[in-house]
């Protein structure tokens, strides 16, 4: 896989998730960051830092991106969310427009 086909998402703690760009584009916010005209750091480097999103939550969000792609292609499966993550995930999902 080529570097331009991936995106690096960085959590508040500095943990890096390298995911397929197609999966990251599930988020309208990330899509806007990566495709905005001009020379924004996110566009140039293919990296997006989320200083307010913890590693645990960002990992679950990445899982959701891949699940969403599968679901949109007709693979209907459940997406399990641990109850203790619900509030933080809802806040992050609101920010990411997912």
Image (cartoon, rainbow, N blue to C red):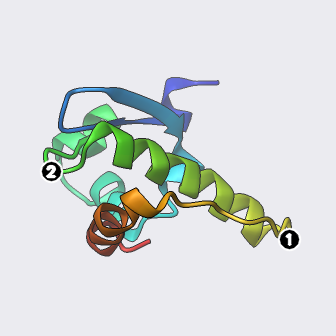
Tell me if 64 is positioned left or right of 10 in this view: right
**Residue drawn at 29 percent across, 45 percent down:** 43
In the image, residue 89 above or below residue 49: below
Label 2 sits on a secondary structure element that is: loop
The reply to whether discs 1 and 2 touch (Cβ–Cβ < 8 Å) is no
Considering depth in this image, is 10 or 85 the residue closer to the camera? 85
Mark with earlier residue (1, 2): 2
Considering depth in this image, is 50 or 89 the residue closer to the camera? 89
Residue 83: x %, y % from top left = 45, 63
**Residue drawn at 37 percent across, 46 percent down:** 58
Considering depth in this image, is 65 or 42 the residue closer to the camera? 65
Circle number at residue 97? none
Residue, disc 1: 74
Circle number at residue 52? 2
In the image, residue 72 above or below residue 54: below
Tell me if 36 is positioned left or right of 39 in this view: right
**Residue drawn at 33 percent across, 66 percent down:** 96
Determine the image quadrant of residue 49.
top left
Label 1 sits on a secondary structure element that is: loop
| Foreground label between 1 and 2 | 2
């Amino acid at each position: 896989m080529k570097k331009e086909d991936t995106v690096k998402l960085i959590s508040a703690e500095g943990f890096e998730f390298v995911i397929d760009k197609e999966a990251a584009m599930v988020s309208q916010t990330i899509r806007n960051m990566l495709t905005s005209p001009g020379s924004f750091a996110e566009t140039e480097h293919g990296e997006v830092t989320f200083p307010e999103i913890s590693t645990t939550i960002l990992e679950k969000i990445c899982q959701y991106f891949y699940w969403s792609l599968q679901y949109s292609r007709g693979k209907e499966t459940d997406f399990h969310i641990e109850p203790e993550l619900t509030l933080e995930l809802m806040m992050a999902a609101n920010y990411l427009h997912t």
